């Protein structure tokens, strides 16, 4: 049984540590290259904290365990809304800006509904995957244009603020403008995330076989909660600082 749980726990630890290093290095490198904070929040922060879910799902698919990949996708969304949102609301009231509700939260619900409908009707193949990626790129372009023209900040801006609250050193100016250290941090973090994702998938598959549980159930529960730890930590820190809107933006 130790052989089953050890890769699972090690995978969780490497995913969290690697995700933190990846985001830290990428954000520092972007700042030193003169990338705007808005673009950093929309891309590096948003994708960086979601890298554990992405890598784990890809690793599961490549390992011939699509149930874990599918369960991780659905379970992470459930964990974000119910677990992270619930804990944040228990700590402090979650008061949300109208822009975040009108645009980002509505889109989140719409995408979740569309994903559920398509999953029931069609197999999740490359065509649908390409469509989802194109939709994501279109959303990012739309948000950048809106926030630059109107000045209204939505959920993704708050997600960036949540990460900076969790680690204020990310936003601090650096005296040394070299790129080598940030890039090495990002590469090391990416390596840890990839290795941790592989361990997590191996441990999850072994656990499912040991207990006779479907891989999708393991992905929906243990894997999903584990890969949602970065969002949980940043949202809890934001809620403890009475920044409920920031916690909400991180969830969305």
Image: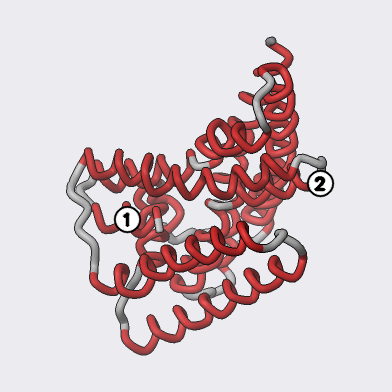
Report the mark closest to the observer, 2 or 1.
2
User: x, y (%) of residue 3?
Assistant: 73, 14
Q: Which residue does the image show at 40% across and 84% down from the upper left?
A: 146
Q: Given the current orientation, which residue lies at the most extreme bottom position?
A: 149
Kindly identify which numbered label has been placed on residue 59.
none
Q: CA distance from mark 2 to mark 1?
A: 33 Å
Q: Given the current orientation, which residue lies at the most extreme front position?
A: 121
User: x, y (%) of residue 42?
Assistant: 49, 68
- Please, what secondary structure does the residue beneath circle 1 have? helix
Q: Is residue 134 above or below residue 158?
A: below
Q: Which residue does the image show at 50% across and 36% down from the upper left?
A: 225
Crowdedness of circle 2 by 10 Å Cα count: few (<14), some, many (20+)?
few
Label 2 vs 1, first from the N-terminus = 2
Kindly identify which numbered label has been placed on residue 62.
2
| Count of marks placed on residues | 2
Crowdedness of circle 1 by 10 Å Cα count: few (<14), some, many (20+)?
many
Q: Is residue 31 above or below residue 164?
A: below
Q: Is residue 170 above or below residue 52?
A: below
Kindly identify which numbered label has been placed on residue 248.
1
Q: Quarter of the image containing the C terminus?
A: bottom left
Q: Quarter of the image containing the N terminus?
A: top right
User: x, y (%) of residue 240?
Assistant: 24, 41
- Please, what secondary structure does the residue beneath circle 2 have? helix
User: Which sits in the foreground, 252 or 237?
Assistant: 252
User: Which sits in the foreground, 111 or 231?
Assistant: 111
């Amino acid at each position: 049984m130790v052989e089953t749980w050890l890769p699972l726990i090690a995978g969780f630890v490497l995913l969290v540590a690697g995700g933190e290093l990846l985001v830290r290095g990428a954000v520092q490198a972007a700042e030193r290259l003169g990338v705007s904070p808005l673009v950093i929040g929309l891309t590096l922060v948003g994708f960086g904290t979601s890298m554990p879910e992405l890598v784990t799902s890809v690793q599961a698919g490549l390992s011939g365990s699509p149930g874990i990949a599918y369960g991780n996708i659905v379970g992470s969304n459930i964990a974000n809304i119910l677990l992270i949102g619930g804990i944040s609301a228990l700590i402090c009231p979650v008061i949300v800006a109208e822009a975040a509700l009108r645009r980002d939260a509505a889109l989140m619900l719409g995408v979740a509904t569309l994903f559920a409908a398509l999953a029931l009707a069609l197999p999740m193949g490359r065509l649908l995957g390409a469509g989802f990626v194109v939709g994501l790129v279109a959303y990012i372009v739309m948000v950048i244009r809106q926030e630059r023209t109107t000045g209204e900040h939505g959920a993704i801006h708050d997600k960036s603020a949540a990460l900076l609250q969790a680690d204020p050193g990310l936003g601090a100016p650096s005296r040394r403008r070299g790129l080598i250290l940030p890039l090495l941090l990002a590469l090391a973090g990416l390596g840890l995330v990839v290795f941790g994702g592989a361990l997590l998938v191996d441990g999850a598959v072994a656990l499912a076989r040991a207990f006779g549980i479907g891989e999708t159930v393991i992905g929906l529960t243990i894997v999903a909660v584990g890969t949602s730890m970065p969002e949980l930590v940043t949202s809890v820190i934001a809620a403890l600082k009475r920044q409920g809107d920031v916690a909400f933006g991180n969830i969305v």
